[in-house]
């Protein structure tokens, strides 16, 4: 069984007017939102800014974002055959697209 | 000449177990300022945080263990190719590091006051400490992070991708990197630089490590003039999770299950097949080393006896539910959330890229061929030869990190940091270069992974390796001279370009060494040269000469 998930993703860097872009992502049940984002980068738009390190283990804690308004990890949230609205974290400074400045202030330049 | 943006006594590239230990030790040995860099978050992005369970250390115990016993097992597992000096460092210094981690309250599991130990495949007795439950890596990272944070001489900088080691007058003089959130270049001067970037498992489509482990440290070392060795030996973890799809679980999660509960590895006919490949295997126990188990599973699949998704079945159905829950309570709930009930169903597993035995050639003081350039942890080649024992990776990270920290501090005590860097301009220009827009470097990374997975996996042959060699050469030729577009905040496409620049020659080094080694040994299995050849008990060493990889054999 396969299907299509539609990801509505906020794009834009800090200081730019945010815009929403739509990506249709093929998927098989069991995949994560992060799988969908990685698919977009390799097959549709490599410029999409996301961040992750561990991919599937939920160890790096980097892929936190808002899915339909809820704060979640992209790697532990299932992709679904519907529209899903993805936003960067609202309480962290925006860098670009879905990436926010999550490093502690004393651990960055 | 470029004035540096930052200066330090010691720069550490990579803030996993090896890098954090190195930073702590460098300060204890007199370094006044240490910069601990990571392309991701400090202490979160490498392989250490993802370790599931075992850490081998011959701490004094009732099993009569000592470092000599551990060394004997490590050398045997390495199939004749270990650098015995590095292996000895791992086994001896590892004990002290594991005990220091205990003092740093990592939380090793205990029986009363004694450290609890499990026996891992290839070890002659229970030797592996761990933190319950599937929590060893996160606990090790957390304990080291807490120590690092207590040292004011260590400045931690995440989101900084080092793109070049600066070499002046033949000596390491600092680094240039990409400040990822801003997209601009950063120049750092330091007389001692430690590469602690881990291995190269990201070169493979299915792997157990993080996206940061793409061999970029090897690329940095090569271009700085250092040597690599044993690059053909990529360890595949035999029972990586394959199906059904799980989320939020590390694919090597079944390792601790097998330590605690045994489990049975079955082919499509329900046969417990490991005993046919390994006379020492006892059904339901976890005794077969990783190279043999990987080969056995792939041979079953090749013979048409694989599981539906192309691996083997792993079964715990004979284990009572109460026992499962006692050993892995919270994990059983996470599995239930993924729709898996181990008392009723088996899961499918397959070998996945897990660790690299090869790496930067270093002395037991962690010195590379370039004065001032050091390596630490998995980035170092040689300690584990052709096959690594379960449990040796974290120990290696800590022991080698500590040693590299000492050596780097000693170097910094005698060599001042430069106030002007002649070699920085070209590296800075590349970080801020304006390249041709378009193309898809993320797709190119995936294409590279497909080539390595198809032709440079645990089972290789000259035909596939030659094909990979040609395809990698074409990819390298097709890579633009500059990263795509213009410098921008968190530009993943430009980061992918730098990764390709770094890891293509590294992938080529793996292929070159694998093609040259016309025998089978440990993790390197040639289907066209199935026997181990005693004349091949040599290490292969590679360096860049005139822009091309040069390969030499040296006696092991």
Image (cartoon, coloured by chain):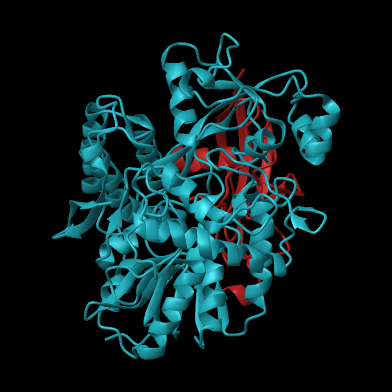
Chain colours: A red, B cyan
Q: How many numbered badges does the structure rendering display?
A: 0
Residue B195 % position (x, y): 41, 66
Q: Is residue A11 visible?
A: yes
Position above or below: B434 against B4 = above
Residue B404 quadrant? bottom left
Residue at 34% of width from left, 44% of height from top? B80
Position above or below: B386 against A95 = above
- Quarter that holds the N terminus of chain B: bottom left
Left or right of B250 on screen, residue B12: left
Viewer-proximal residue among B531 and A39: B531
Residue at 44% of width from left, 64% of height from top? B376
Viewer-proximal residue among B131 and B438: B131
Residue B87 % position (x, y): 43, 56
Residue B358 % position (x, y): 36, 50
In the image as oriented, which residue stretches furthest toward the top? B269
Residue at 68% of width from left, 63% of height from top? B142
Residue B474 quadrant? top left
């Amino acid at each position: 069984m396969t299907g299509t998930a539609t990801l509505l993703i906020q794009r834009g860097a800090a200081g730019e007017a945010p815009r929403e872009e739509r990506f249709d992502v093929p998927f098989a049940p069991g995949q994560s939102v992060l799988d969908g984002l990685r698919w977009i980068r390799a097959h549709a738009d490599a410029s999409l800014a996301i961040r992750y390190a561990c991919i599937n283990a939920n160890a790096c804690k980097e892929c936190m974002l808002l899915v339909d308004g809820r704060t979640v990890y992209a790697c532990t949230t299932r992709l679904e055959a519907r529209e899903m609205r993805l936003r960067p974290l609202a309480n962290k400074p925006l860098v670009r697209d879905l990436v926010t400045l999550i490093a502690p202030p004393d651990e960055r330049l | 000449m470029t004035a540096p943006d930052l200066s330090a006594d010691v720069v550490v590239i990579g803030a996993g177990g090896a890098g954090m230990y190195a930073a702590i030790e460098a300060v204890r040995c007199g370094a006044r300022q240490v910069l601990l860099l990571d392309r991701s978050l400090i202490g979160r992005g490498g392989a250490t945080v993802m370790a599931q369970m075992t850490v081998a250390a011959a701490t004094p115990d009732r099993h009569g263990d000592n470092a000599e016993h551990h060394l004997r097992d490590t050398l045997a597992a390495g199939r004749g190719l270990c650098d015995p000096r590095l292996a000895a460092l791992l086994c001896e210094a590892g004990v002290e590091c594991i005990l220091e981690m205990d003092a740093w309250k990592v939380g090793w599991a205990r029986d009363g006051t004694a450290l609890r130990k499990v026996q891992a495949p290839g070890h002659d007795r229970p030797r592996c400490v761990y933190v319950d439950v599937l929590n060893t890596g996160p606990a090790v990272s957390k304990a080291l992070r807490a120590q690092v944070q207590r040292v004011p001489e260590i400045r931690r900088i995440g989101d900084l991708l080092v793109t070049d080691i600066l070499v002046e007058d033949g000596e390491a003089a600092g680094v240039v990197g990409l400040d990822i959130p801003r997209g601009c270049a950063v120049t750092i001067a330091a007389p001692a630089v430690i590469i602690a970037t881990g291995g190269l498992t990201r070169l493979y489509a299915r792997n157990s490590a993080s996206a940061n482990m793409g061999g970029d440290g090897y690329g940095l070392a090569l271009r700085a003039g250092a040597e690599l060795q044993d690059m053909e030996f990529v360890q595949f973890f035999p029972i990586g999770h394959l199906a059904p799809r799980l989320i939020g679980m590390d694919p090597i999660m079944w390792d601790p299950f097998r330590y605690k509960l045994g489990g049975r590895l079955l082919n499509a006919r329900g046969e417990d097949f490991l005993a046919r490949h390994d006379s020492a295997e006892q059904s339901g126990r976890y005794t077969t080393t990783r190279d043999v188990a990987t080969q056995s599973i792939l041979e079953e699949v090749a013979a048409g006896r694989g599981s539906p998704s192309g691996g083997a079945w792993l079964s715990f159905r004979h284990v009572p539910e109460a026992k499962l829950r006692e050993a892995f309570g919270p994990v059983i709930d996470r599995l239930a959330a993924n729709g898996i009930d181990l008392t009723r169903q088996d899961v499918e597993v397959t070998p996945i890229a897990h660790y690299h035995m090869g790496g930067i050639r270093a002395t037991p003081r962690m010195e590379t061929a370039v004065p001032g350039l050091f390596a630490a942890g998995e980035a170092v080649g040689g300690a584990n030869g052709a096959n690594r024992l379960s449990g040796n990776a974290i120990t290696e990270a800590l022991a080698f990190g500590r040693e590299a920290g000492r050596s780097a501090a000693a170097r910094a005590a005698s060599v001042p940091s430069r106030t002007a860097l002649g070699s920085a301009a070209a590296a800075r220009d590349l970080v801020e270069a304006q390249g041709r827009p378009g193309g898809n470097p993320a797709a190119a990374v995936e294409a590279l992974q497909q080539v390595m997975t198809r032709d440079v996996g645990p089972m290789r042959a000259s035909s596939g390796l030659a094909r990979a060699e040609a395809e990698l050469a074409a990819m390298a030729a097709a890579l633009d001279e500059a990263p795509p577009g213009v410098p921008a905040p968190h530009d993943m496409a430009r980061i992918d370009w730098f990764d390709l620049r770094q890891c293509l020659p590294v992938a080529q080094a793996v292929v070159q060494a694998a093609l040259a080694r016309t025998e089978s040994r440990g993790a390197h299995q040639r289907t066209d040269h199935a026997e181990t050849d005693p004349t091949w008990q040599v290490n292969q060493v590679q360096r860049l000469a005139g822009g091309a990889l040069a390969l030499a054999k040296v006696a092991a």
